[in-house]
Image: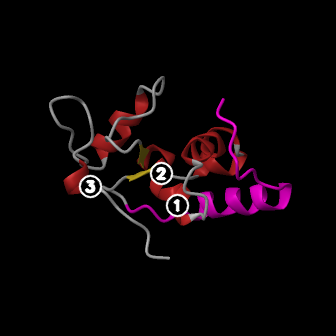
Amino acid sequence: MRDYPDKMLPAQALAFQRDVLNIVSQIPRGHVTTYGIIAAWAGWPTHSRMVGRTLRYAPEAASLPCHRVVNKQGRTAPGWSRQQALLKEENVTFKANGHVDMQRHLWEPLL
């Protein structure tokens, strides 16, 4: 695991989690955003992996549209085979390589 020079204090980690969950709750149907965009909007642009951990382990995330979060190339989460099907149900289109068409579906928050 990478050692971040800008480690979070416990209070910052809680605020980060709250911000991540808030941003994910706003992703509109038929759109996706990236771990990196979420991390940047939460004020920690180097912590995109922590966004993924937050979505995986925060109990509140279960009721959010976490399937709308992909990596910057538009790849879905490894090991989550249902993610692509959930996105297709929302008319998100995929390129021939299996990645989300980011030009058509990328959403950036307006906080």
Q: Is residue 64 above or below residue 88?
A: below
Which badge, 3 or 1, comes first in the chain's sequence?
1
Residue matched to label 2: 36
Q: Is residue 15 above or below residue 92?
A: below
Tell us which disc is closer to us: 2 or 3. 2
- Residue placed furthest toward the top: 79
Three-letter code for the amino acid on which mark 3 is drawn = His
Residue matched to label 1: 40
Asked if the residues shown at circle 2 and circle 3 are in contact, with their CB atoms under 8 angstroms apart, the answer is no
Element at label 1: helix
User: Residue 94 is drawn in which quadrant?
Assistant: top left
**What range of the chain is rendered magenta?**
1-28
Give the number of callouts.
3
**Label at residue 105:** 3
Residue 93 in the image, given as x and y percentages of width and height: 20, 44
**Label at residue 66:** none
Asked if the residues shown at circle 2 and circle 1 are in contact, with their CB atoms under 8 angstroms apart, the answer is yes
- Between the C-alphas of marks 2 and 3, the distance is 16 Å
- Residue placed furthest toward the front: 5
User: In the drawing, does residue 11 fall left or right of residue 60?
Assistant: right
- Between the C-alphas of marks 3 and 1, the distance is 19 Å
Q: Residue at x 50, y 76 (%)?
A: 111
Q: 57 or 65, which is in the foreground?
A: 57
Residue 61 in the image, given as x and y percentages of width and height: 62, 49
Neighbor class of circle 1 (other Cα within 10 Å; few <14, some 14-19, many 20+) is some
Q: 21 or 14, which is in the foreground?
A: 14
